Image (tube, rainbow, N blue to C red):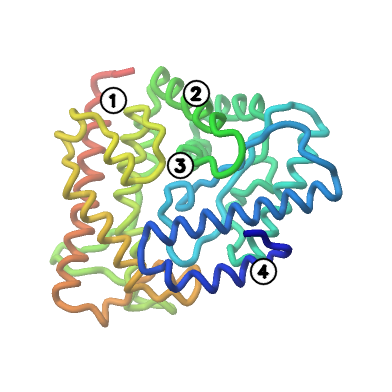
């Protein structure tokens, strides 16, 4: 399968999305295939103008793409790592990153509002520059730099050299472990919307175009995502998806937190998002209208939200206990 233009790839995406959107794993496999086709075409276009890449490189995705947790619509979150360090290499790979970003946009993926794209010098670096950048973020450990590190922890190689991303993640694990930073990672993820009030009622948006709907991404999914990312950091796990992180936890952590229930509830949340959210566009794909839910669906949704909050609270307790004992 080869494509000669990004609009062709967009057409392919539209033709296959309806069928793929019936299943969480199929839709993420489709997103990966579309990304790879965009990268191949972007590489071909870049080579026509600037020649072949000056050295091996890795293209990685992060965010929901890195975690293989995309829905029908997904924005761009990605970066580049290249092995040679020179001004010429930087110029070449920024051109490639820009072409990939443009290609993804033309194929139906909005640009990242936060600029987490290979067209941004912050996310397109030689491996030696990435090592320095990660060290700088870890040493600075400000709210913003910790946020960048959390983003990188979800990175997954989609094209090119496989080992670079994992080597850089191990650097994060080592420095976070030795510099007592896990509590800062925790603090960066503690603020999220509450989905249920003290009376046990769901809390939908009260005004705007999504009034009467619940942001299932922030309220439902994020507590699970953030909790299991923190556990991946604690246990030095290279896995990126929330489900694979849950499966890879040590027996000690699994017994402390539980596993099967959270796996079941997270999968159900992903299913609810695909089947019940309005998938008109990227923004609406995160909102679930409460009006059309049955009593059983409402009860299940409450349970999923409660269990996510309980999981995050359990992880928070583990990390705060570790911090109070001065663990390194």
Which residue is at 48% across, 52% downward?
65
User: Label 4: how many residues lie within 10 Å, few (<14), some (14-19) or many (20+)?
Assistant: some
In the rendered image, which residue does mark 4 sit on? 8
**Cβ–Cβ under 8 Å for marks 1 and 3:** no
Q: Quadrant of the C terminus?
A: top left
Q: Earlier in the sequence, mark 1 or mark 3?
A: 3
- What is the residue that sits farthest to the front in this orientation? 1
Q: Which residue position is annotated with label 2? A: 171
Q: CA distance from mark 2 to mark 4?
A: 40 Å
Local SS, label 3: loop
Is 302 displayed left or right of 225 in the figure?
A: left
- x, y percentage for residue 66? 47, 47
Please count the marks in the image.
4
Q: Find numbered disc 4 in the image and state the secondary structure of the residue it sits on.
A: helix
Point out the tag, 4 or 3, that comes first from the N-terminus.
Answer: 4
The percent coordinates of residue 287 (x first, y second) are 38, 70
Looking at the picture, tell me which residue is in the foreground, 300 or 163: 163
Residue at the bottom extreme, as displayed: 292
Please tell me which of labels 2 and 4 falls first in the chain.
4
C-alpha separation, residue under disc 2 versus residue under disc 3 = 14 Å
Q: Which mark is residue 323?
A: 1
- Answer with left or right where residue 22 lies relative to residue 121: left
The structure residue drawn at horizontal position 50% and vertical position 41%, both measured from the top left corner, is 155
Q: Nearer the viewer, mark 1 or mark 3?
A: 3
Q: Are marks 2 and 3 in contact (CB under 8 Å)?
A: no
Residue 58's mark? none
Q: Which residue is mark 3?
A: 154
The numbered mark, 2 or 3, whose residue comes first in the sequence reads 3
User: In the picture, residue 201 is in which quadrant?
Assistant: bottom left
Name the quarter where the N terminus is drawn: bottom right
**Can you give x and y, in whole percent of width and height, for residue 222 in the image?**
35, 53
């Amino acid at each position: 399968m080869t494509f000669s233009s990004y609009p062709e790839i967009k057409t392919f995406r539209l033709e296959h999305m309806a069928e793929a959107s019936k299943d969480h794993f199929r839709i993420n496999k489709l997103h990966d295939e579309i990304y790879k086709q965009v990268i191949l075409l972007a590489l071909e276009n870049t080579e026509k103008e600037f020649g072949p890449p000056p050295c091996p490189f890795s293209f990685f995705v992060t965010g929901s793409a890195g975690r293989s947790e995309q829905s029908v619509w997904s924005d761009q979150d990605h970066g580049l790592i290249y092995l040679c360090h020179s001004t010429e290499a930087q110029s070449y790979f920024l051109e490639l990153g820009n072409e990939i970003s443009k290609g993804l946009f033309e194929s139906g993926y909005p640009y990242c509002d936060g600029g987490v794209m290979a067209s941004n010098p912050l996310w397109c670096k030689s491996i030696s520059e990435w090592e320095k950048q990660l060290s700088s973020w870890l040493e600075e450990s400000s709210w913003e730099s910790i946020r960048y590190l959390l983003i990188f922890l979800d990175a997954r190689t989609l094209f090119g050299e496989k080992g670079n991303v994992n080597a850089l993640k191990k650097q994060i694990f080592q420095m976070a472990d030795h510099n007592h930073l896990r509590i800062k990672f925790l603090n960066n993820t503690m603020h999220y919307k509450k989905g249920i009030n003290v009376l046990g009622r769901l809390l939908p948006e009260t005004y705007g175009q999504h009034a009467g709907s619940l942001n299932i991404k922030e309220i439902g999914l994020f507590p699970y995502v953030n909790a299991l990312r923190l556990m991946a950091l604690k246990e030095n796990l290279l896995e990126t998806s929330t489900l694979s992180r849950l499966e890879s936890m040590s027996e000690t952590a699994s017994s402390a937190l539980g596993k099967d229930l959270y796996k079941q509830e997270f999968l159900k949340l992903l299913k609810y998002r695909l089947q019940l959210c309005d998938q008109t566009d990227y923004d609406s794909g995160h909102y679930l209208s409460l009006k059309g839910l049955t009593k059983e669906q409402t009860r299940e949704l409450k349970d999923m939200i409660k269990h996510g909050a309980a999981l995050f609270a359990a992880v928070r307790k583990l990390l705060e206990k570790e911090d109070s004992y001065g663990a390194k």
